[in-house]
Amino acid sequence: MDVDGGSFRRQHQSFPSASFRRPSHTTDVTPTTDDTSRQASLHLDFIIIGAGIAGLSAAYALAKSGHRVQVFEQARGLKYQTGGVRLPPNATRILTHWGVEKELAQKGSISTSSSLLDMKTGRQIGRSAWQAALFEEMGSSFFMMHYADLLDVLFRLASSAGARVNFGVTVESVEPARETGTINTPIAGPASRTLRPTVRLKTGERFHADVIIGADGRRSMIRRVVTDKDDEPEANGLSVYTGSVPAAKIRNYAPLKQLVDVVWPFWLGHRRIVLAYPVRRHQEFIVNVLWEDRSGFTAAARPAVIDSWDPTTSLTSLRYKEGQMDPRARCLLDMVGPVSRQSWNKIPPPETWVDESESIILIGDAAHPQGPVTGCGSYLALEDAAILGGLFSRLRSADQVPTLLYAYMDLRKGRADGLVAMEQHNVEVGMSSPSRIRDGLVRWSALPADVPESGPTETELAEISEVWGYFAIDAADEWWVEWGLLRERSQLRM
């Protein structure tokens, strides 16, 4: 192993200036300096494909642990999305631990309640009111944040920790580590015959690393390398639209002002959902619309399946019958300007996140693909990164790498697959018909409308605690105490 990273630094210097671009963002975030910050004894070379939430989070967590990290992103700068992200306590605890609590307060909006409304009548189906004591027990609050604001924070964190983020880079292929009779920068020293995995760019340049991380989203190219499968999305005839409205515009309409000033509203109907939530300290509202294409468009105008955000759409093409929508929801949709649209397609979760060569892994939506704008995407990506960084902060020898990669997958896969399935179930239930079935099946986020002062049941609290009370950094440390140290001690006795 080239422990001192000399060859990797030479690769840095050989990058052609025209091929790699950086946006004009500052790097003024100071990394956390708490006593829990830990540096690995052995520093690896990581290449991360994709500079979204998952990629930048992992870049920070690994660089903070002392590893040499590069991120390759095809876009020419940070790839902003129109919408927002929802960050429950399990996510905000990670961000607070990373030292960006101030940015959360400045750029986010705290959510304390939501209301489920019938799409047609506006009748309240259920509500939730998360009490301050619940958040105190969880150790953090529930924040709403603009996607672009979170991405800016993560980019500055990653850069400040020493990760290099390269923009305008198109990855042509990724080759796993392979057995060979020729020794060439081996991962485990002169006795090893395993080459490091390789990233080949469209320019023909090739870069080697000890571990390659696929953070390239739902239609991940790296996932095909890891699983040797090309998973086709399952179309369900639904599209997601996301846009935003200035809060001042909403508050000019009294019935809507009264609603959004108090709660985070969900309108639920057959094969359609409209929801709005505040960001940027309640100065802006993100609006998400989930709509059935077959009823939403004329045959001539029906859009093709789109698996990435199409930024050229407006909500004027949505069709509904007069009297079939709460006037407040209709007014809100009329206020939304240009929106981005993406087809809501199901992609089955991969069976494994670690390739056969044990040198390529998946994180974020590449590992646990889900529908666009589902609530758990952002916080699962942050958890992935926190676990990965925590495990690799313990690295002492190259032969630990496969163990830590599988530990990462074991710690994350069951939780991620379960939460993605739960989110999909909640969406399907919220769009189901008849309404009496839907109203009876909506899960723990809805409390009975006729008892607004009641709190969650014990079962609901248990589910909330399982999701929101999880702290990924502690989970990584607990794994090390239970299994990592045991493995090290057993090797010492050999």
Image (cartoon, rainbow, N blue to C red):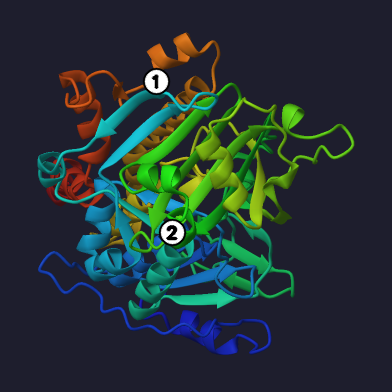
Name the spot of residue 178 as percent of width and height, x first: 58, 54
Residue 289, quarter of the rendered image: top right
Tally the numbered discs.
2
- Horizontal side of 240 relative to 362 (left or right) equals right
Instruction: Give the number of the disc on residue 40.
Output: none
Distance, label 1 to label 2, CA atoms, is 29 Å
Residue 82, quarter of the rendered image: bottom right
Name the spot of residue 480 as percent of width and height, x first: 19, 48
Q: Is residue 359 visible?
A: no
Which residue is rendered at x = 62% and y = 48% of the image?
334
Secondary structure under the numbered disc 1 in the rendered image: loop
Please state which of residues 13 and 423 is positioned toward the viewer in this rendering: 423
Which residue corresponds to mark 2? 247
Which residue is rendered at x = 32% and y = 43% of the image?
407
- The reply to whether callout 1 and callout 2 are in contact (CB within 8 Å) is no
Which residue is rendered at x = 33% and y = 47% of the image?
403
| Badge 1 density bin: few <14, some 14–19, many ≥20, Cα 10 Å | many
In the depicted structure, whether residue 29 falls above or below residue 308: below
Please state which of residues 344 and 255 is positioned toward the viewer in this rendering: 255
Q: Amino acid at mark 2?
A: Ala
Secondary structure under the numbered disc 2 in the rendered image: helix
Residue 43, quarter of the rendered image: bottom left
Please state which of residues 344 and 57 is positioned toward the viewer in this rendering: 344
Name the spot of residue 20 as percent of width and height, x first: 62, 81
Name the spot of residue 232 as percent of width and height, x first: 70, 34
Which residue corresponds to mark 1? 442
